[in-house]
Image (spheres, grey):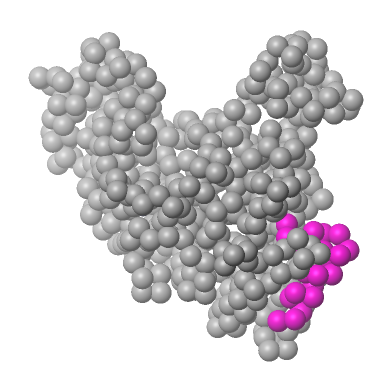
Amino acid sequence: MMNYQISRLINFGLQKGLIETDDVEYSVNMLLDVLQLDSFEFFKIEEELATAVPILEEMLEYSVNKGIINNSVTEKDLFDTRIMNCIMPRPNEVVNNFTSLYEKEGANSATDYFYNLSIASNYIRKTRTDKNIFFTYDSDYGEIEITINISKPEKDPKEILKSKNIVSTGYPKCALCKENVGFKGDFNRAARQTHRIIPIKLDNEEYYLQYSPYVYYNEHCIVLNKEHIPMKIDIETISKLFSFVEQFPHYMIGSNADLPVVGGSILSHDHFQGGRYIFPIENAKIMYSVKLEKYPSTSVELLKWPLSTIRLSSDKKKEVLELSEKILEKWKNYSNIDLNIINKTDEVRHNTITPIVRYENGKYIIYLTLRNNRTSEDYPFGIFHPHESLHHIKKENIGLIEVMGLAILPARLKTELELLGKCLLGQEDINKHESLEKHYDWYKDLKNKDFNENNVKEFIEEETAKIFVKALDDCGVFKLDETGSKAFIEFVESI
Ligand SMILES: [Zn+2]
């Protein structure tokens, strides 16, 4: 029985180019070892599968029944990665294939190869990530995108804040470190035997390219520093982002801010995120255009976007870089008491930027989103962070991806929103569900609105999206009202 499944997996590996004919016996023997079997007979297989999941499920069921592993999601995830490892190309083979495709056919072919490999190897659990919920909402800022991610646990900002200060002694130091390649994983950390990274150079500094196993959007990639060093936003960072899009012009790339509350979940390891995707922010309308004499060939636009964003574009990289640096330096030193923007308290810096870049038709384009991470008595989670009344939907940091208009909402919302729909229709009693307690005020508000049995799902999605947009509004340092807009324009024009 398992011989048949092994034959299927070998067939799959050959079809997907994970292994070659010369690797077959070697891979079979590795699989026999992992599955604790002693002999093998090859079955003729004629099938073509999109992913190895149907085969892995059979193997997992067998292994649970045989007592090789326990029947838990974590153990199964660790074990099916060990299984896939038996048909994986060595890291250097992947690097060589990528490099030779890049040289012969260009960046596009190289990333296509690497992305498809990451799916075929089940490193990206596509059957799982395909289950993520996705919908859009037509807001005042244009179309906003929402995903409810059901494949990753949520972190709260306090945990993330702590993470920056932790001196890691573990191995690997963090989930991004290059030492994760081949890592067996444990109960806290995913197995990474099927993980591969490609060395690249950004302005002569050594980085690696990998895909995110959680694929929040198409070809969601991560570029990580070779060393475990903290995130930092300065002009060198921005220059490195441009260096990336020069090499991979079909991708955009951005960096999370380098401060807690407004940054990403990992501040301790310098990294960027990119991909082949057009984000809502790129379609935002222009609120105001500025002409700066010193930078004649650069267009400077303030976007009609909830987070205060300046877009620069020019065919002169030097100009864009110089101007970006000016804006960054000016922002770091900017305070406006009337708007609650204070750049420093007790020598602790609060102002930073979330930068996003693209290289298109010979133009260098950068989005500079101004951020401030100060907290106050009224806003202990952050003045420019989703306010507490919105935490029932979104309490985590608004990081790079969300700045660009793609919400990543916590998994818990899938069941909560379904249940809430039933409560709205009178099929369930909200008071009987503890998980809906936090939604109670919202529920009362929704109850008075217009919906029916046929559209309740879409109705709740739209209302959820509205909350997310409010969360983004909270993060904007210059609000889009008259005072805020005026101050924002003054800020840019004074450069
Ligand atoms: Zn690290």
Nearest the camera: 93 or 164?
Answer: 164
Q: Is residue 439 magenta?
A: no
Q: Position of residue 214 (x, y in %)?
A: 47, 40
Q: Residue furthest front?
A: 346
> Could you say which is closer to the camera, residue 73 or residue 433?
433
Q: Residue drawn at (86%, 59%), measured in percent from left and top? A: 481
404 is higher (above) or lower (below) than 18: below
Split into 4 quadrants, where in the image is the C terminus?
bottom right
Q: Nearer the viewer, residue 69 or 20?
A: 69
Q: Seen in the image, is 62 located left or right of residue 495?
A: left
Which residue, as the protein is rendered here, is positioned at the far bottom? Answer: 294
Q: Residue furthest left?
A: 38
Asked where in the image residue 480 lies, by quadrant, the reply is: bottom right
Q: In the rendered view, would you say 458 is above or below 267?
A: above
Say which residue appears at 63% left-offset and 29% top-offset. 413
Is 308 on the left or on the right of 277, as rendered? right
- Judged left or right of residue 108, residue 466 is right
Quarter of the image where the N terminus is located: top left
Read off the magenta span.
475-495
User: Is residue 36 depicted above or below 353 in this figure?
Assistant: above
Quadrant in which residue 334 is drawn = bottom right
